[in-house]
Image (tube, rainbow, N blue to C red):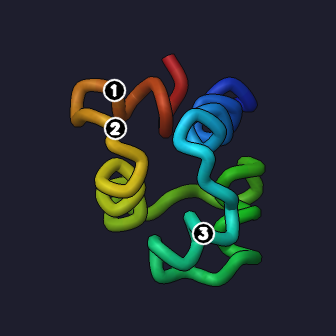
Amino acid sequence: MEKSTTNAVRGRLGELKMSISTFAKNMGISKNRAFAIINGERAYTAIEIEKACDILKISIECIPDYFFGT
């Protein structure tokens, strides 16, 4: 995973003033899992991308920018 994509998600969390712990809770995943995917150590699953988009208010058109790098 590219660093720019992890920075995009981290930046969006900042824009929404949401901690990674809160993000993890809303996603229904452990804090360790949340830190790993946000830091690019693990990949998001398709279901996690869908949930993250809902939580972070990311439109479908912007998914590549946030999760796959362009």
For label 1, the crowd category at 10 Å Cα-Cα, with few meaning under 14, some 14 to 19 and many 20 or more, is few
Placement of 45 over or under 60, stated as above or below: below
Q: Nearer the viewer, residue 54 or 47?
A: 54
Rounded to the nearest whole Å, what is the CA distance between mark 1 and mark 2? 6 Å
Point out the frontmost of discs 1 and 2: 2
Q: Judging from the image, what secondary structure is the residue with disc 2 in?
A: loop
Q: Is residue 30 above or below residue 5?
A: below
Viewer-side label of 2, 3: 3
Residue denoted by label 1: 62
Which label belongs to residue 22?
3
For the point 74% across and 63% down, the residue is 36
Is residue 1 shown to the viewer in this render?
no
Identified by mark 2, the residue type is: Ile
Verify CB contact (< 8 Å) between mark 1 and mark 3. no
Choose between 20 and 70: the one closer to the eye: 20
Instruction: Give the structural element (helix, strand or loop) at label 3.
Output: helix
> As drawn, which residue projects farthest toward the front?
17
Q: CA distance from mark 1 to mark 3?
A: 22 Å
The numbered mark, 2 or 3, whose residue comes first in the sequence reads 3
27 relative to 10 in the view: left or right = left
**Residue 10 at x, y percent in the picture:** 67, 40
Q: Residue at x 68, y 58 (%)?
A: 19
* Disc 1 to disc 2: CB gap under 8 Å: yes
Residues under labels 2 and 3: Cα distance?
17 Å
Who's the residue at 24% across and 26% down the image? 61
- The residue shown at (67%, 73%) is 33
The residue identified by callout 2 is: 58
Where 16 sits versus 22, above or below?
above
Quick one: label 2, few (<14), some, or many (20+) residues within 10 Å?
some
